[in-house]
Image (cartoon, rainbow, N blue to C red):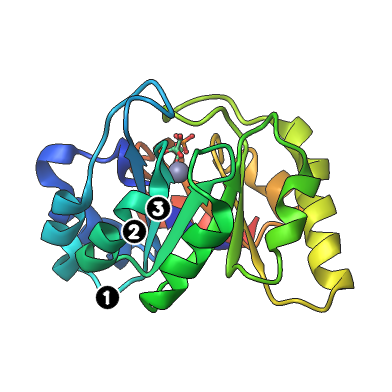
Protein backbone atom coordinates (compact mmCIF):
# COMPACT_ATOMS: atom_id res chain seq x y z
CA UNK A 1 0.00 0.00 0.00
CA UNK A 2 0.94 3.62 -0.39
CA UNK A 3 1.00 5.61 2.83
CA UNK A 4 -0.60 8.99 3.44
CA UNK A 5 0.28 10.31 6.92
CA UNK A 6 -2.56 12.40 8.35
CA UNK A 7 -1.33 15.71 9.74
CA UNK A 8 -4.19 15.64 12.26
CA UNK A 9 -1.83 13.89 14.68
CA UNK A 10 1.25 16.01 14.02
CA UNK A 11 2.63 18.80 16.19
CA UNK A 12 0.63 21.73 14.80
CA UNK A 13 3.14 24.27 16.09
CA UNK A 14 5.67 22.64 13.73
CA UNK A 15 3.43 21.66 10.85
CA UNK A 16 5.95 22.55 8.11
CA UNK A 17 8.72 20.56 9.78
CA UNK A 18 6.34 17.67 10.46
CA UNK A 19 5.68 17.47 6.71
CA UNK A 20 9.42 17.39 6.04
CA UNK A 21 9.79 14.65 8.67
CA UNK A 22 7.25 12.28 7.07
CA UNK A 23 8.46 13.10 3.56
CA UNK A 24 12.00 12.04 4.53
CA UNK A 25 10.57 8.96 6.29
CA UNK A 26 9.02 7.66 3.05
CA UNK A 27 5.46 9.03 2.88
CA UNK A 28 3.77 8.81 -0.52
CA UNK A 29 1.18 11.55 -0.01
CA UNK A 30 0.28 14.07 2.69
CA UNK A 31 -3.29 13.70 4.04
CA UNK A 32 -4.90 16.93 5.26
CA UNK A 33 -8.14 16.73 7.27
CA UNK A 34 -10.45 19.72 6.94
CA UNK A 35 -13.33 19.87 9.45
CA UNK A 36 -15.97 22.58 9.81
CA UNK A 37 -17.58 21.85 13.18
CA UNK A 38 -20.87 21.03 11.40
CA UNK A 39 -20.30 17.96 9.27
CA UNK A 40 -18.19 16.59 12.11
CA UNK A 41 -17.99 17.84 15.71
CA UNK A 42 -14.43 19.15 15.40
CA UNK A 43 -12.55 22.04 13.78
CA UNK A 44 -9.17 21.79 12.08
CA UNK A 45 -7.37 23.62 9.32
CA UNK A 46 -8.54 25.48 6.23
CA UNK A 47 -7.03 26.62 2.93
CA UNK A 48 -4.83 29.29 4.56
CA UNK A 49 -2.74 26.78 6.50
CA UNK A 50 -2.61 24.37 3.56
CA UNK A 51 -1.30 27.13 1.28
CA UNK A 52 1.26 28.16 3.90
CA UNK A 53 2.75 24.67 4.13
CA UNK A 54 2.48 23.69 0.45
CA UNK A 55 6.11 24.54 -0.28
CA UNK A 56 7.50 22.16 2.39
CA UNK A 57 7.23 19.08 0.15
CA UNK A 58 6.72 18.01 -3.43
CA UNK A 59 4.49 15.10 -2.32
CA UNK A 60 0.85 15.26 -3.44
CA UNK A 61 -1.56 16.95 -1.02
CA UNK A 62 -4.56 14.67 -0.38
CA UNK A 63 -7.20 17.00 1.05
CA UNK A 64 -10.09 15.27 2.89
CA UNK A 65 -13.03 17.64 3.28
CA UNK A 66 -15.31 16.90 6.23
CA UNK A 67 -17.50 19.93 5.66
CA UNK A 68 -21.20 20.44 4.91
CA UNK A 69 -20.79 22.42 1.66
CA UNK A 70 -17.63 21.23 -0.14
CA UNK A 71 -18.61 22.77 -3.49
CA UNK A 72 -18.40 26.27 -2.02
CA UNK A 73 -14.74 25.79 -1.07
CA UNK A 74 -13.22 23.88 -3.99
CA UNK A 75 -11.64 26.98 -5.52
CA UNK A 76 -10.04 27.94 -2.21
CA UNK A 77 -8.49 24.48 -1.78
CA UNK A 78 -7.36 24.44 -5.41
CA UNK A 79 -5.67 27.78 -4.85
CA UNK A 80 -4.08 26.40 -1.67
CA UNK A 81 -2.33 23.67 -3.69
CA UNK A 82 -4.47 20.54 -3.29
CA UNK A 83 -3.64 17.70 -5.71
CA UNK A 84 -6.51 15.42 -4.68
CA UNK A 85 -9.74 16.66 -3.10
CA UNK A 86 -12.10 14.14 -1.51
CA UNK A 87 -15.53 15.09 -0.17
CA UNK A 88 -18.24 13.13 1.64
CA UNK A 89 -21.30 11.81 -0.18
CA UNK A 90 -23.16 12.50 3.10
CA UNK A 91 -22.41 16.26 2.75
CA UNK A 92 -24.93 18.74 1.29
CA UNK A 93 -23.35 19.75 -2.03
CA UNK A 94 -24.40 18.04 -5.27
CA UNK A 95 -21.78 15.28 -5.85
CA UNK A 96 -21.67 15.55 -9.65
CA UNK A 97 -21.33 19.35 -9.57
CA UNK A 98 -18.59 19.02 -6.95
CA UNK A 99 -16.67 16.39 -8.95
CA UNK A 100 -16.93 18.53 -12.10
CA UNK A 101 -15.75 21.64 -10.25
CA UNK A 102 -12.71 19.77 -8.88
CA UNK A 103 -11.84 18.41 -12.34
CA UNK A 104 -12.30 21.82 -13.99
CA UNK A 105 -9.50 23.14 -11.78
CA UNK A 106 -7.11 20.32 -12.78
CA UNK A 107 -7.42 18.47 -9.48
CA UNK A 108 -8.15 14.78 -8.89
CA UNK A 109 -11.60 14.20 -7.34
CA UNK A 110 -12.56 11.57 -4.81
CA UNK A 111 -15.68 10.62 -2.86
CA UNK A 112 -15.67 9.54 0.79
CA UNK A 113 -18.18 7.43 2.70
CA UNK A 114 -18.74 7.18 6.43
CA UNK A 115 -19.01 3.75 8.12
CA UNK A 116 -22.82 3.77 7.93
CA UNK A 117 -22.93 4.36 4.17
CA UNK A 118 -22.99 1.26 1.96
CA UNK A 119 -20.54 0.49 -0.85
CA UNK A 120 -23.29 0.96 -3.46
CA UNK A 121 -23.43 4.69 -2.67
CA UNK A 122 -20.17 5.26 -4.55
CA UNK A 123 -21.05 3.13 -7.59
CA UNK A 124 -22.71 5.95 -9.60
CA UNK A 125 -19.50 8.01 -9.33
CA UNK A 126 -16.86 5.35 -10.04
CA UNK A 127 -16.38 6.39 -13.67
CA UNK A 128 -15.94 10.03 -12.64
CA UNK A 129 -13.49 9.90 -9.75
CA UNK A 130 -9.78 9.29 -9.18
CA UNK A 131 -10.27 7.80 -5.74
CA UNK A 132 -12.79 6.37 -3.30
CA UNK A 133 -12.05 6.93 0.39
CA UNK A 134 -13.63 4.48 2.82
CA UNK A 135 -13.72 5.64 6.45
CA UNK A 136 -12.62 2.94 8.88
CA UNK A 137 -13.65 5.12 11.87
CA UNK A 138 -16.40 7.71 12.31
CA UNK A 139 -14.84 10.89 10.89
CA UNK A 140 -13.90 13.71 13.23
CA UNK A 141 -11.02 12.60 15.39
CA UNK A 142 -7.68 10.83 15.21
CA UNK A 143 -6.71 7.94 17.43
CA UNK A 144 -9.93 5.90 17.22
CA UNK A 145 -10.19 2.12 16.92
CA UNK A 146 -10.06 0.56 13.43
CA UNK A 147 -13.42 -0.83 12.28
CA UNK A 148 -12.53 -4.15 10.71
CA UNK A 149 -16.15 -4.66 9.71
CA UNK A 150 -15.49 -2.11 6.94
CA UNK A 151 -13.21 -4.60 5.12
CA UNK A 152 -16.00 -6.28 3.11
CA UNK A 153 -17.08 -2.81 1.92
CA UNK A 154 -13.57 -2.06 0.65
CA UNK A 155 -13.50 -5.40 -1.18
CA UNK A 156 -16.94 -4.78 -2.68
CA UNK A 157 -15.87 -1.38 -4.03
CA UNK A 158 -12.56 -2.75 -5.31
CA UNK A 159 -14.36 -5.61 -7.10
CA UNK A 160 -16.84 -3.22 -8.72
CA UNK A 161 -13.95 -1.05 -9.95
CA UNK A 162 -12.20 -4.11 -11.40
CA UNK A 163 -15.33 -5.56 -12.98
CA UNK A 164 -15.90 -2.29 -14.83
CA UNK A 165 -12.28 -2.13 -15.96
CA UNK A 166 -11.78 1.22 -14.21
CA UNK A 167 -8.60 2.63 -12.73
CA UNK A 168 -9.86 4.11 -9.45
CA UNK A 169 -7.82 4.00 -6.24
CA UNK A 170 -9.28 2.87 -2.92
CA UNK A 171 -8.07 4.68 0.17
CA UNK A 172 -8.85 3.70 3.79
CA UNK A 173 -8.75 6.20 6.67
CA UNK A 174 -8.92 5.72 10.42
CA UNK A 175 -7.24 3.51 13.00
CA UNK A 176 -4.62 2.15 10.60
CA UNK A 177 -1.38 1.09 12.25
CA UNK A 178 1.10 -1.76 11.95
CA UNK A 179 -1.51 -3.95 13.67
CA UNK A 180 -4.43 -3.28 11.33
CA UNK A 181 -2.73 -2.44 8.02
CA UNK A 182 -2.56 -6.04 6.76
CA UNK A 183 -6.35 -6.37 6.97
CA UNK A 184 -6.82 -3.15 5.00
CA UNK A 185 -4.30 -4.28 2.42
CA UNK A 186 -5.87 -7.73 2.00
CA UNK A 187 -9.30 -6.14 1.55
CA UNK A 188 -8.02 -4.17 -1.45
CA UNK A 189 -6.80 -0.84 -0.08
CA UNK A 190 -4.36 0.98 -2.37
CA UNK A 191 -3.56 3.90 -0.06
CA UNK A 192 -3.77 3.89 3.72
CA UNK A 193 -4.11 7.05 5.77
CA UNK A 194 -2.42 6.94 9.16
CA UNK A 195 -2.30 9.70 11.75
CA UNK A 196 -1.35 8.43 15.18
CA UNK A 197 0.17 5.28 13.63
CA UNK A 198 2.82 7.43 11.94
CA UNK A 199 3.19 10.59 14.02
CA UNK A 200 3.17 8.90 17.42
CA UNK A 201 5.43 6.02 16.39
CA UNK A 202 8.86 5.74 18.03
CA UNK A 203 10.46 5.48 14.58
CA UNK A 204 8.60 7.26 11.78
CA UNK A 205 10.45 5.61 8.91
CA UNK A 206 9.95 2.14 10.37
CA UNK A 207 6.24 2.79 10.91
CA UNK A 208 5.77 3.92 7.30
CA UNK A 209 7.78 0.95 6.02
CA UNK A 210 5.62 -1.46 8.03
CA UNK A 211 2.43 0.04 6.56
CA UNK A 212 3.81 -0.16 3.03
CA UNK A 213 4.75 -3.80 3.41
CA UNK A 214 1.64 -4.91 5.31
C1 LIG B 1 -10.52 11.27 10.95
C2 LIG B 1 -9.55 11.64 9.87
C3 LIG B 1 -8.35 10.79 9.79
C4 LIG B 1 -7.53 10.75 11.05
C5 LIG B 1 -6.92 9.40 11.13
O1 LIG B 1 -11.72 11.93 10.74
O2 LIG B 1 -10.18 11.62 8.60
O3 LIG B 1 -7.56 11.15 8.68
O4 LIG B 1 -6.52 11.70 11.11
O5 LIG B 1 -6.23 9.31 12.33
P1 LIG B 1 -5.79 7.92 12.92
O6 LIG B 1 -4.86 7.30 11.94
O7 LIG B 1 -5.13 8.30 14.20
O8 LIG B 1 -7.05 7.13 13.12
ZN1 LIG C 1 -8.88 11.89 6.82
Q: CA distance from mark 2 to mark 3?
A: 6 Å
Q: In the rendered image, which residue does mark 2 sit on?
A: 74
Q: Quadrant of residue 84?
A: bottom left
> Which image quadrant for residue 213?
bottom right
Quarter of the view holding residue 22? bottom left
Query: In terms of secondary structure, where does tag 3 sit?
Result: helix
Quadrant of ligand 2: it is top left
Which residue is disc 1 drawn over?
A: 58
Of residues 179 and 111, the one drawn nearer to the viewer in this rendering: 111
Measured as percent of width and height from the top left, residue 32 is found at 34, 50
Crowd band around label 2 with a 10 angstrom C-alpha radius: few (<14), some (14–19), many (20+): many
Whether pointer 1 and pointer 3 mark residues with C-beta atoms closer than 8 Å, the reply is no
Could you tell me which quadrant the N terminus lies in?
bottom right
The residue furthest top is 41
In the picture shown, does residue 16 fall above or below 147? below
Residue 189: where, in percent of width, then height?
A: 68, 57
Whichever of callouts 1 and 3 sits on the residue coming sooner in the sequence is 1
Quickly name the residue at label 3.
71
Q: Are marks 2 and 3 in contact (CB under 8 Å)?
A: yes
Q: Residue furthest right?
A: 163
Residue at point 40%, 48% (across, down):
70
Q: Are marks 1 and 2 in contact (CB under 8 Å)?
A: no
Q: Position of residue 80 (x, y in %)?
A: 21, 63
Instruction: Report the Cα–Cα distance between label 1 and label 2.
Output: 21 Å
* Residue 207 or residue 63, whichever sits in front: 63
Closer to viewer: mark 1 or mark 2:
2
Observer-nearest residue: 167 or 213? 167
Q: Residues within 10 Å of mark 1 (few under 14, many from 20)?
A: few
Mark 3: give few (<14), some (14-19) or many (20+) Cα within 10 Å.
many
Q: Is residue 152 above or below residue 77?
A: above
Amino acid sequence: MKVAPSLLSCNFAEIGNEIIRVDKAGADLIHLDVMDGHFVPNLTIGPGIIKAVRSYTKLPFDVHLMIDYPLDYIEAFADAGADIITFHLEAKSDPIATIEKIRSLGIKPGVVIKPGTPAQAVFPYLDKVYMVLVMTVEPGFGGQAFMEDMMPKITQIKNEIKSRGLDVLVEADGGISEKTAAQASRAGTDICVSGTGVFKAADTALAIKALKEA
